[in-house]
Image: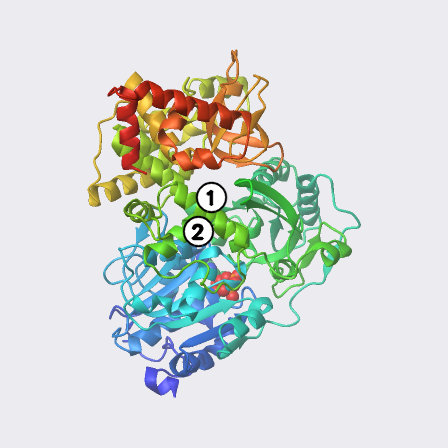
Amino acid sequence: MASQVLGLEEESGPNPGDSELAVNPFDGLPFSSRYYELLEQRRSLPIWAARFTFLEQLESSPSGVVLVSGEPGSGKSTQIPQWCAEFVLARGFQKGRVTVTQPYPLAALSLALQVADEMDLTLGHEVGYSIPQEDCTGPDTLLRFCWDRLLLQEVASTRGTGVWGVLVLDEAQERSVASDLLQGLLRDARLGNLPGDPRVVVVTDPALEPKLQAFWGNPPVVHVLGETGRCSTPVYRDTVPTDRVEAACQAVLELCRKEAPGDVLVYLPSEEEISLCCESLSRDGGSLENQGPPPRVLPLHPGCGQAVQAVYEDIESGARKVVVTHWLADFSFSLPSIRHVIDSGLELRSVYSPQIRAESQVLRPISKCQAEARRLRATGILPGSCLCLYPKSFLELEAPPLPQPRVCEENLSPLILLLKRRQIAEPGECHFLDRPAPEALMQALEDLDYLAALDDNGDLSDLGVILSEFPLAPDLAKALLASCEFDCVDEMLTLAAMLTAAPGFTRPPLCAEEAALRRALEHVDGDHSSLIQVYEAFIQSGADKAWCQARGLNWAALCQAHKLRGELLELMQRIELPLSQPAFGSEQNRRALQKALVSGYFLKVARDTDGTGNYLLLTHKHVAQLSPYCCYRSRRAPARPPPWVLYHNFSISKDNCLSIVSEIQPQMLVELAPPYFLSNLPPSESKDFLNQLREEMADSSTGSESSSTQELGDACVLQ
Ligand SMILES: Nc1ncnc2c1ncn2[C@@H]1O[C@H](COP(=O)(O)OP(=O)(O)OP(=O)(O)O)[C@@H](O)[C@H]1O
C-alpha cells in the first residue's frame, strides 16, 4: 500500500498537539506555527479527499503515468507537488527530484512562493523556481516550479536537467506548445536518453480529461470532486457592449454601491484594456460615498512581474479587492476571496500565420471550458455572482469547447530547432495531442534552412547547434552570431535583449512633455538603434522607475532586458564566441550592425517602391505600413520613407503594421542573404532589381579583391 511504502498516514502531516518536537522531514527543523495554520487550510481543499488515492496511483501505476482531473481552485497546483515531494523523499531521492511545469512564468513563481510557505521551507533552497532570467534554485532544491518552455529548452540543450523523480505537467488544458510537446515526447519515451525514469503526473481541467486519457492509453485517473452548491448561476447581458471597459467598470461600481460583500474578479481580453479599466476604477472608486474604503484595484497580467503576489495579500483597511485580469487567470491564480466575477467572454491572442510569416492579434470568444472556469471563480460561503457581459447565445454559438492548442497558432521554428538539437524527434514523427498544420511545419523547416541552421540532410548544422543554445528566436540568434563576424557584439547583445524583453514604446505619448522626452531617445538610423539608445539611457539613469514612467517605457520589461543581456553575454563567453568593444555611434559600427541584422532578418525585408509609405513585403504579396510608433513616422519632418527596410514584426490585425523598422541597403541583402533565398522569392519588381544588382556586383568584383568580395566572404562563414 502506498501509505506503507511512503511511511505516511492517510491524513498526513503532524497535528499541532501531536508532538512538541515534530520536525520537517525536508530540512530537519521543527515546524513553525504558521505551518499548522496553513495545514488546516490545506486540509479543507477538495483535493485532500483524493490524497491517498493519488499517492497509491503514483506508486503503482503500471505505465508510471497518473492523470489528475479537477476543477480550478480545488488545490491541484499547490498540493500535488507537495505530495510528489513526499513520494521522492520516501524513496530517499534515489530516483530524482520533482519538477512541476507551468504554462506561464508568473504562475511558476507565485506557486513556488506559496508552496515553500505551506511546506515551511526556504524559497531558493528546498523549493525553487526557474523562469526566464531568474533561476531561484540551489543544490538542495527538491521541488522546482518551472516555466514549461524553459524545461523544454533545458531538455534540448546540453545543460541538462538532473534526474527527474516525478515530472508534473500542470494546467495541461492550457495547451501550451511546450506542455503538448513534452507530453508527446514522454509518451514516446523519446526522452529516454535523459537520466532517470520519471513518474509523470498530468494535471488537467476535467474538460480535457477524455482526450488526455486516450492520448496516454488509459492511465489511472484521480478525480477531484468540486465543491457543490457554492457557485452562482451566471447572469447574461442581452447584448455585447460596444465599450467593454466602461461596461465592466460600471458593473464593479454597481456591486460596490449595493455593498455586496466579497472581492471581485474582472476578465477583459487584453493587457491594454486591463490597464484602462484599472485607471478608470482607481479614479471613480474614490467617489463612492458611504461605502467604506475605496476598492483596491489590482491588475493581473504577465507584465506585473513579482507584484502579482499582491492579489493574494490581505488588505488591512478591509477594502474590497478588485482584480482585473485576462486569460492568465482562467486556470491559474485561484483566489479564495473572490465572490463576484465579471466576464467579457473574449480574449485577445496572438496567432501566427505561416503562409505570410505574420502575427495577428485576434479578438475572439473564449472557449466554453474557459467560461466555465471563470464562472467557478465566484465561490465562497456567502452567495456570489457571475455577470457575463454577453448574451447566453454568444458562446453557445461561437465558442469552441476547449482552448485552442497553441501549437496550431505559433511560429514553430524555435520548437523545431529544439527538437533537432538533441535529435529527439523528427518533427513529422512526433506525436502531438493535435498535429500542427503541415504548412506550418514546412515553413518552419524552410526558415531554418535559409538561416543555415540545417545541413544537406536536414539535420542541424554546426551553426544550428549554436543557434539552439540561445533563448532567442532563431533569426535573432543568427543576427547575434553574425555580430561576432562584424565586430558589433556589444550593441547586438543589447538589441537582442531589448527585442526579446522590451519592445519599446507601445502606446502613444500621454502629453507633449512625454512626446518630447521620447523623441530625444529616437535615433536617426532607425528603431533598432533607438532601442539600443533607450537601453543605454535607462542604464545611465540607474534603472530608475520614474525615468521610465516619464517616457512611457515599461520599467519591468527594461529590467528584464538588462538581466537577459547578462545571460546572453555569459552564454557567449561560455561557448567561447568572440566579443567586441562598445562602439555605438561610429559609422563603422552602424554598418556592422546593419549587416548583422540583415544576416538574421533577410526574410523580413520590405520595399516602398513609390514613396507612398506602402511597403511590399519581399517574401509574399502583402502590403504593409510602418507602425505609428516607428521613428520614421513619429519624426517631425520625414523627407521620404526609407525605400528598403528590415522589420522585426509584421502584424496583420488592425492595420498591416511593420514594427521595429530600420533602413537597409539592398546591396547588403544581395551580399548577405543566401543566393537560393533570393532565387526562391516570388516574382516581383524587387526580385528583378535584386537579381540585377547581384549580377552587377558579381561583375564588378570579378578579378579584384574588392571590399565587397571580402564582405561576401565574411558572410559565407555564416551560411
Ligand atoms: N500563489 C499563491 N499565493 C497564495 N495562495 C495561493 C497561491 N496559489 C494558490 N493559493 C491558494 O491555494 C488554494 C488552492 O489553489 P490551487 O492553485 O492549488 O488550485 P488548483 O486546483 O490548482 O486551481 P488552478 O487550476 O486554478 O491552479 C487557492 O484557493 C488559494 O487560496
Compared to residue 424, the image places residue 519 above or below, namely: above
What's under tag 1, amino acid-wise?
Cys
Which residue, given by chain and number where applicable, does mark 2 sit on? Answer: 106
Q: Position of residue 710 (x, y in %)?
A: 26, 25
Earlier sequence position, callout 2 versus callout 1: 2
Residue 396: quadrant of the picture: bottom right
Please state if 370 lies on the left or on the right of 574 as rendered. Answer: right
In depth, the one of 693 and 273 nearer the eye is: 693
Disc 2 and disc 1 in contact, CB within 8 angstroms: yes
Say which quadrant the N terminus sits in.
bottom left
Please state if 209 lies on the left or on the right of 678 as rendered. Answer: right
Q: Residues within 10 Å of mark 1 (few under 14, many from 20)?
A: some
Gap between marks 2 and 1 measured at Cα: 9 Å
Which type of secondary structure does the marked residue at label 1 adopt?
helix
What's under tag 2, amino acid-wise?
Leu
- On the question of residue 708 being in view, the answer is yes
Residue 483: quadrant of the picture: top left
Q: Position of residue 637 (x, y in %)?
A: 52, 11
Residue 152: quadrant of the picture: bottom left
Which residue, given by chain and number where applicable, does mark 1 sit on? Answer: 304
